[in-house]
Image (cartoon, rainbow, N blue to C red):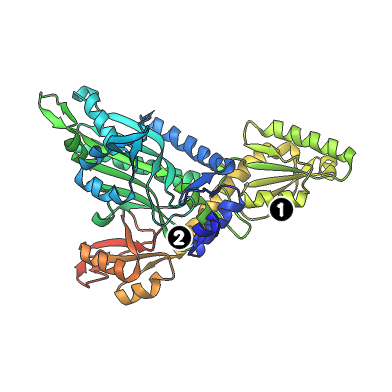
């Protein structure tokens, strides 16, 4: 059995679609190391678009990029009890290197709170050194038992922000601010509507005081955690003795945050926007926003058409990521299919008749609509408007799906009937962990978050816990998740 066949065993419908499109659109391929993936150039180009958009927003909020080592002394993870307990099963550990046993084992980073705190304890001495606002773009290794392309791989790419503050209030403002940045990225760039809120204690990041999240509903009805932002309190500061002298000359532990998103976002794009033809990319993060396909039969036509295509590309390149597919070995029909699979938002078809009439034919990837006889002289403004329409339409379709598949349930019987069909279930919860765990054991569904705002209007201020039927005031969102 091949590596790909081994890794594709037991995929459910949604995961099968994800793997199919990731492979056919040439986004990724399976590595010879089980659980790892190779991100192909087109997939990496999507990540670069996401990365550049997010990096700009991160820097606009005052953060600076840095880089910390891949290897972390094993003793560092032992310093924060909840942290080591949460990550121990996923850690890859190096015990032999340079031809000999290491004096201290090294953990391949599953996240960087510990080593960054070690450095913070050296850098921070006074309130004048605060806040420290650091971001890192890096790779992470977590030894996952059940891996899936983009969604959950042994190694993945991400950014992780780490900040230190003088007060709890300042740190909590930071945590929520960065969650807001992720929401903007998801909704305005990826065209994926999200629900933002707070994780319950059982879903909280190991070592955090509070974990905030953004959750997206995929087309198969499962929820995907797309990003998290954590208020760490002083837990890591105490473990690493990260202190500062305040304005009164007193030593205080810093308050900290951490937050991150990963290449899982590419999986979210695939599972939110794909159709039977393949990928559909939002224009804002598409590596190629416009593909130009020349159409000709004879050599004389070829030269004329290719020249016009290149002129068109030159005219539009300052406003769009545009490419002419001038490969001679493939037919126009083959190219149409190829770029549909890859999800390029706009295709321009250009042949001799179009040139003589000074028009082009445009095909929208989101709706498959053909727009004939578009005048070339108005093309730039037309395409700018069309690009915005496609971006908004993809978001609208995904948001309509989210609302259509969000249900209010009032008792465990309704819950059991609905949960296997997928979607979000809104219900009251008494805030007891045992009720949350009971439903998880029965249905494999979890509380995705305590939402800041429900996706559908609710007038009820109190009801009855979905599990124990006791009076409750807290509404939560349950779903099956990746």
- Say which residue appears at 14% left-offset and 24% top-offset: 247
| Residue 127 shows in this picture | yes
Q: Give the farthest residue toward the front.
A: 99
Which residue is identified by label 2?
402
Mark 1 lies on a secondary structure that is strand
- Say which residue appears at 61% left-offset and 55% top-offset: 278
Q: First in sequence: mark 1 or mark 2? A: 1
Mark 2 lies on a secondary structure that is helix
Q: Residues within 10 Å of mark 1 (few under 14, many from 20)?
A: some
| Residue 460 shows in this picture | no
The circle on residue 193 is none
Q: Position of residue 299 (x, y in %)?
A: 88, 39
Residue in the foreground of this view, choosing between 186 and 120: 120
Residue in the foreground of this view, choosing between 273 and 407: 273
Which residue is identified by label 1?
370
Q: Position of residue 389 (x, y in %)?
A: 58, 48
- Say which residue appears at 51% left-offset and 59% top-offset: 6
Q: Position of residue 286 (x, y in %)?
A: 57, 43
């Amino acid at each position: 059995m091949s590596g790909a066949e081994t890794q594709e065993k037991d995929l459910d419908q949604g995961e099968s679609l994800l793997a199919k499109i990731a492979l056919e659109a040439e986004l990724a391929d399976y590595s010879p190391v089980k659980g790892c993936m190779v991100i192909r150039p087109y997939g990496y180009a999507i990540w670069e678009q996401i990365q550049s958009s997010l990096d700009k927003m991160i820097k606009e909020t005052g953060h600076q990029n840095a880089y910390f080592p891949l290897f972390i002394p094993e003793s560092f993870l032992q310093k924060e009890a909840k942290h080591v307990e949460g990550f121990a099963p996923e850690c890859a550990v190096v015990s032999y290197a340079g031809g000999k046993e290491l004096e201290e084992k090294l953990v391949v980073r599953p996240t960087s709170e510990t080593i960054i705190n070690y450095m913070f304890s050296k850098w921070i001495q006074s309130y004048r050194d605060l806040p420290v606002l650091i971001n890192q773009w890096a790779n992470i290794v977590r030894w996952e038992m059940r891996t899936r392309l983009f969604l959950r791989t042994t190694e993945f790419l991400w950014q992780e922000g780490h900040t230190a503050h003088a007060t709890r209030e300042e740190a909590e403002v930071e945590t929520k601010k960065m969650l807001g940045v992720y929401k903007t990225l998801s909704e305005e760039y990826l065209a994926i509507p999200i629900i933002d809120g707070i994780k319950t204690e059982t879903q909280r990041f190991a070592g955090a005081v509070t974990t905030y999240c953004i959750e997206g509903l995929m087309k198969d009805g499962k929820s995907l955690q797309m990003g998290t932002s954590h208020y760490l309190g002083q837990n890591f500061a105490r473990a690493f003795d990260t202190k500062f002298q305040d304005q009164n000359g007193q030593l205080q532990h810093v308050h900290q945050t951490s937050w991150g998103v990963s290449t899982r976002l590419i999986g979210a794009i695939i599972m939110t926007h794909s159709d039977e033809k393949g990928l559909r990319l939002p224009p804002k993060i598409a590596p190629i926003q416009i593909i130009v396909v020349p159409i000709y039969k004879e050599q004389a036509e070829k030269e004329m058409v290719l020249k016009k295509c290149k002129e068109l590309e030159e005219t539009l390149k300052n406003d769009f990521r545009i490419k002419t597919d001038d490969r001679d070995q493939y037919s126009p029909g083959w190219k149409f299919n190829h770029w549909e699979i890859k999800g390029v938002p706009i295709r321009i078809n250009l042949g001799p008749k179009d040139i003589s009439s000074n028009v082009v034919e445009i095909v929208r990837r989101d709706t498959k609509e053909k727009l004939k006889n578009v005048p070339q002289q108005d093309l730039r403004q037309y395409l700018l408007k069309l690009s915005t329409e496609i971006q908004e339409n993809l978001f609208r379709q995904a948001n309509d799906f989210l609302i259509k598949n969000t249900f209010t349930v009032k008792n465990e019987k309704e819950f059991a009937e609905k949960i296997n069909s997928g979607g979000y279930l809104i219900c009251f919860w008494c805030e007891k962990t045992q009720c949350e765990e009971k439903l998880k054991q029965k249905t494999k569904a979890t509380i995705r978050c305590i939402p800041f705002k429900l996706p559908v209007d609710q007038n009820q201020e109190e009801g009855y816990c979905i599990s124990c039927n006791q009076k409750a005031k807290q509404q939560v969102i349950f779903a099956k998740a990746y």
